[in-house]
Amino acid sequence: MSTLAIILIATAAGSLLSLLLAAIVAMSARPHWVPVLVSYAIGALLGASLLEVLPEAVEMSGDIRTVSMALLGGIMLFFLLEKLVLWRHCHDEICEAHGSHDDHRHDHGRSGLMITVGDTFHNFVDGIIIAGAFLADFRLGVVTALAIIAHEIPQEIGDFLILLHSGYSRTQALMLNFLTGVATLIGALVGYYALSKLEGWTPILLGLGGASMLYVAMSDLIPGLHKRAEIGATLQQLVLIGLGIGSVGLAGHFIGNGH
């Protein structure tokens, strides 16, 4: 099977899985599942970035300074994009960026549209990152795709709920989430054809990918966990984050041994 086929299968499977689970959870009206998925996603993102993506980028380039600059530049870029409301993730029914339930019901779909535009861009970048990871190494590609899928599931659930509260019907919300998922495939195609000819850019892209994972985990996801400061919730969060990190480590180990 060609590398391009593997990339397209991984991105399509991830998009469909996250969309399906988001629809099931949102239509079942069980948003309390989201914090559990978010905690696991944090671990998966941190593990993939710090244990797999960034070490691979350093190994490929042989220059830790170049990768560090890409990492710093990526963090600044994602900060700027979030400030411009081009990239905003919401994992709860109510969040600072989108206001209250009543706001959603009376904004004529504006917050839902904002989420759709932001997620389309985000998914496009995710596709490029997945393509770059697979071009660098099959094992790295699988681990990166799994981490992105782990993050996409709680993100899609949160976005689905925002669309519903913004006045969209369940069918409309499902279709919008499907369309944003298509952007991942487009990004994967762009990444594959561009990076196949520009191999020297792969370590830089991996550095940006690592920055994306770290920024999302630490800026968008972790602050939401602090809303529950009780000991029981904290222990649950730590266990789930540990499971996320551990699953990435195990996946990398077994894929590495099997490939």
Image: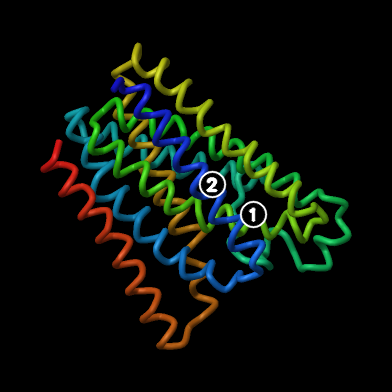
Position of 75 compared to 119: left or right? left
Which is closer to the viewer, label 1 or label 2? 1
Q: Residue at x 83, y 68 (%)?
A: 102
Image spot of residue 155 (x, y percent): 55, 54
Give the residue type that dot 1 points to: Asp
Circles 1 and 2 in contact, beta carbons < 8 Å = no
Under circle 1, the secondary element is helix
Q: CA distance from mark 1 to mark 2?
A: 20 Å
Q: In the rendered view of the protein, which quadrant contains the C terminus?
A: top left
In-front residue for pair 4/148 = 4
Position of 228 compared to 135: left or right? right
Up-down relation of residue 64 to residue 177 (above or below): above
Image spot of residue 153 (x, y percent): 50, 54
Label 2 packing within 10 angstroms: few (<14), some (14-19), many (20+): some
Q: Which residue is mark 1?
A: 159
Under circle 2, the secondary element is helix
Up-down relation of residue 92 to residue 89 (above or below): below
Q: As drawn, which residue projects farthest toward the top?
A: 197
| Quarter of the image where one finds residue 28 | bottom right
Q: In the rendered view of the protein, which quadrant contains the N terminus?
A: top left
Q: Which residue is mark 2?
A: 79
Label 1 packing within 10 angstroms: few (<14), some (14-19), many (20+): many
Q: Residue at x 76, y 68 (%)?
A: 100
Q: As drawn, which residue projects farthest toward the bottom?
A: 231
